[in-house]
């Protein structure tokens, strides 16, 4: 499921066992390739909350997680940052990224 970001990022992280965060921008080519794959992950995995963060709109949040290149994908488990990937990934790579 894709969760809307409404100034509640910390709550989303704390209230879900796994959260996949996609830091992107509308003008970013690789982000446009990864975005549909992230949406597929959201549809196929009920156990993962997915949050899409537009870095142009949420510069402070991107800065807080040291996002300097996009796309950046971060996986949170039990409220803690578990993994971070910079750059485009295939669906198979995304599946491996979220696997336990």
Image: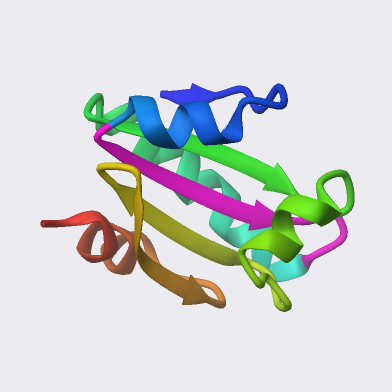
* Position of residue 23 in the picture relative to residue 58 (left or right): left
Q: Measured along the vertical axis of the image, is residue 40 above or below residue 56?
A: above
Q: Position of residue 31 (x, y in %)?
A: 67, 61
The picture quadrant where one finds residue 24 is: bottom right
Residue that protrudes farthest toward the left in the picture: 100
Segment colored magenta = 17-28
In magenta stretch: residue 19:
yes
Q: Residue at x 58, y 67 (%)?
A: 72
Q: Measured along the vertical axis of the image, is residue 89 above or below residue 47?
A: below
Q: Measured along the vertical axis of the image, is residue 86 above or below residue 56?
A: below
Quadrant, the C terminus: bottom left
**Can you see residue 72?**
yes
Q: Which residue is drawn at 46% across and 74% down?
A: 85
Q: Residue at x 56, y 52 (%)?
A: 22
Q: Which residue is drawn at 50% across and 62% down?
A: 73
Q: How was this image coloured?
A: rainbow
Q: Measured along the vertical axis of the image, is residue 75 above or below residue 58?
A: below
Q: Position of residue 14 (x, y in %)?
A: 38, 32
Q: Position of residue 16 (x, y in %)?
A: 32, 29
In magenta stretch: residue 47:
no
Q: Which one is in front, 46 or 90? A: 46
The picture quadrant where one finds residue 92 is: bottom left
Q: Which one is in front, 9 or 97? A: 9
* Position of residue 46 in the picture relative to residue 35 (left or right): left
């Amino acid at each position: 499921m894709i969760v809307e970001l409404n100034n509640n990022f910390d709550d989303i992280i704390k209230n879900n066992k796994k959260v996949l965060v996609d830091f992107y921008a509308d003008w970013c080519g690789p982000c446009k390739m990864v975005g549909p794959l992230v949406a597929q992950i959201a549809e196929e995995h009920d156990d993962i909350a997915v949050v899409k963060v537009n870095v142009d709109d949420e510069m402070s949040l991107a800065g807080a997680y040291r996002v300097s290149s996009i796309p950046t994908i971060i996986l949170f488990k039990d409220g803690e940052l578990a993994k971070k990937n910079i750059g485009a990934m295939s669906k198979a790579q995304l599946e491996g990224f979220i696997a336990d």
